[in-house]
Amino acid sequence: MTADTPVIALEDVSVVFGGKVRALDGVSLHLHRGEIVGLVGESGSGKSTLCRTLMGLGEPTSGTVKIDGEPLGARLARDRLGFRREVQMLLQDAVASLSPRMRVRKLVEEPLHVHRLPLEDGRARIEVLLKRLGLPANAMEKFPHQLSGGQARRVAILRALVLRSQVIVADEPTAGLDVSVQGELLNLMLDLHDEFTLTYLIVSHNLNVIRRITTRSVVMYLGQVVEEASTAALFRTPAHPYTAALLSTNPVVDPAKRRQRIVLRGEIPSPINLPSGCRFHTRCPRAAPRCAQEAPQLRTVGEGQSVRCHFPLTDDLVAA
Amino acid sequence: MTSLIAIRQTFGRILSTLAGAVGTVIIVLVVGAAILAPLIVTHDPDALDILNRFSGPSVAHWLGTDHLGRDLYSRLVFGAQVAMLVALIAITSALVLGTLLGILAATLSTRWERVILIVFDIISSFPSLVLALAVVAVFGPSTALVTVIVAVTLVPHFGRVARAQMLTLRNAPFMEAERLLGTSATRIVLSHVLPNIAGPLVVLASIDIPVVITIEAGLSFIGLGVRPPLASWGTLIYDGYAYLSDSMIPVIVASAALGVATLGFTLFGEALRDAVDPRLDRGGH
């Protein structure tokens, strides 16, 4: 393993359910150690399937998932618990992701038992982490339903940190939280990232979250990556009309910076009956006849920016 | 401990209703009699005293004697022991086996699920009495056989409830979180599934106790269960019935014991069901 081997690499991964539903179609995604990558897309764009696949909860129909350069299947067969320690996932509904009849103490000690880690060390570490995560001392005696959304998320993070996980996949880490609590949680996640050199994959449709903490972003539409760029570039000069439409719906405080809102027509099409050509052409404000016939490939349009579009918006910038 | 507090709270709620309190008192009496049977009887339940047959209640024989002069009170107490033992063993085995099959049905492939459900359907479409007749015809009557028959007929009860509970749990986020943590299937079932499905199953078990008692008594009454001279409420009623023209006391006393015990367990079971009803707010735990 060399220094630049990605911790997690998806190579041309497709997941097809029942031979018909193309949930993921040729997705490639690389996560390097210490990176914070955002994954953006509507519901139905394949974000959850992607997470499940890279967590080993579902097999890809084709393509490979590699962990530290090793195929996931081989890694699971060789060292299932080791993989689970290295890569952890925070589920969207934090309260419901904690076993309802267990007190927090038992919940955070459970990783020690499951992974047969030394109890004394583990408990000491839990004490330290409890303070570090800003959980109140009495939280240990509470049941999940007695925790606030923010506390439940911290407990879930604690469970991952007890295992000294290196990679954390967070599905909508701020869903259902007040804005102030969202801010605190994101700051905490950033601090933990630096402190423990964590690698994050943040899945969200909240663009403010993505902008706030990620360095690189991947936009998905109907099971495909449609754009990938540094977060700064993505927000400054979106290349894909879909990205532009997403960004235009994002609430911005400063009226001077507000964009013209692009309203997408209709719903996201069914992954069973995919549109011909470019999957986005049915809703694209820039669609041309070519888009309905020829499927665009991902191509590089700038420094670290690639897009799956025949007529990327960045071309206009060059022309202008 | 959590569970202890929860159990105490549940009992508090049961005792706070009249039906629950009456049921609890009856259960304590019946179970107490069953456990303490050898200590609280006044006579050997099998000792014959032909000269004193059909004697009425007296200081020597509190409830009188039967057609062979055996002490009715002592036989009644030992009958409680038989009823409780059969109920305990049959329900525990049905609970364990049913829960296991139910969880498997909800977890395994649809093919195995269908096999398990068909087995449940076959068992429950078979009247337990007919099943008992068939089995007894082959093996001859015995207490052990009654227990097995009752247990088998109850397995689908627990199995169906366990499966339904497991189906709702299966896709719960915390189950996924446990899989992601690397928790083994055994540990998930023991630490995360059982605590969450135990409530309805325990209620069902308590509601099934009177059913078991009546089935045992019924089978013993028609001579397919407990064999004489062992005292069971069913055999007591049968013996009394045969000599009804000589004395009505044995039938009345044994039937009353059966009726009161059934009533007690039913009241308790229903109070327990209400006490753990999820629709009631169980506040601060």
Image (cartoon, rainbow, N blue to C red):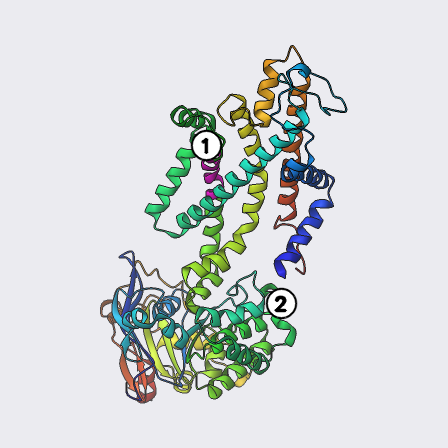
Residue A100 or A194: which is nearer the viewer?
A: A100
Q: Name the amino acid, label 2.
A: Lys
Snapshot quadrant of residue A214: bottom left
- Image quadrant containing the C terminus of chain A: bottom left
Residue A11 pos. (x, y %): 27, 75
What residue appears at the point 45 percent right and 55 percent down from the top-left corner?
A: B170
> Magenta span: helix, strand or loop, mainly?
helix
What residue appears at the point 46 percent right and 43 percent down from the top-left corner?
A: B160
Residue at the left extreme?
A294
Q: Is residue B244 left or right of residue B151?
A: right
Magenta highlight range: B148-160
Q: Which residue is mark 2?
A: A142
Is the residue A257 above or below the residue B111 in the image? Answer: below
Chain to which mark 2 belongs: A
Residue B283 pos. (x, y %): 67, 58
What residue appears at the point 68 percent right and 49 percent down from the top-left corner?
A: B11
Residue at the right extreme?
B59
- Is A77 covered by the magenta stretch? no
Q: Which residue is mark 1?
A: B145
Residue at the top extreme?
B245
